[in-house]
Amino acid sequence: MSTEEMHNFGKDGIDIALHSFGAWTKSAQAIMVELVDYSKKSVEDSAAAWEKLMGAKSLEKAVEIQAEYLRSSYGGLVAEATKLGELYGDLAKEAYKPFESAAAKAASAS
């Protein structure tokens, strides 16, 4: 391998690492924003349910409020888990792209 080829190989490796790191950073930021938004909404929903619960005039109404809150919370958790799964999947795809193109480039060169 010539000096120029080694230089290009090293440069390509650094470019791949930087692109991959950029994808990780962008995706991690999106995931963190999603988690913060979900946490904030969860706290707000919990406070609202607690307020309703404190205003319940009967045990039956309190049980109804609690059941409604649990159904809503579970639905929100499932939706959030699905959304986060998609974000993590996108993260993996984006982080792999630079390596995929480098592998294709290496395969076509040989």
Image (tube, helix red, strand yellow):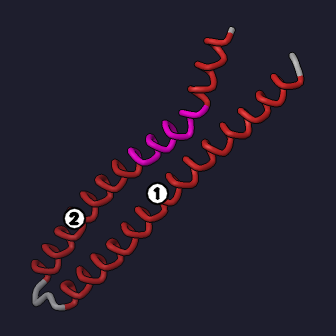
In primary-sequence order, the first of circles 2 and 1 is 1
**Residue 89 covered by magenta stretch:** yes
Residue closest to the eye, 56 or 1: 1
What secondary structure is marked by label 1? helix
Q: Nearer the viewer, mark 2 or mark 1?
A: 1
Chain part drawn in magenta:
85-98
Rendered image: mark on residue 31 = 1
Quarter of the figure with residue 98: top right
Rendered view: 17 above or below 56:
above
Spot the residue most to the top. Answer: 110
Residue closest to the eye, 38 or 28: 28
Rendered image: mark on residue 72 = 2
Instruction: Say left or right for 26 vs 46.
Output: right
Q: Position of residue 41 (x, y in %)?
A: 32, 73
Give the amino acid at mark 2: Ser
Separation of residues labelled 2 and 1 (CA atoms) = 22 Å
Rendered view: 73 above or below 45:
above
Quarter of the figure with residue 17: top right
Q: Main secondary structure of the magenta part?
A: helix
> Residue drawn at (81%, 22%), measured in percent from left and top?
5
> Residue drawn at (27%, 64%), measured in percent from left and top?
73
Q: Position of residue 25 (x, y in %)?
A: 57, 54
> Residue drawn at (34%, 56%), measured in percent from left and top?
80
Quarter of the N terminus within the rendering = top right
Q: Position of residue 106 (x, y in %)?
A: 66, 17
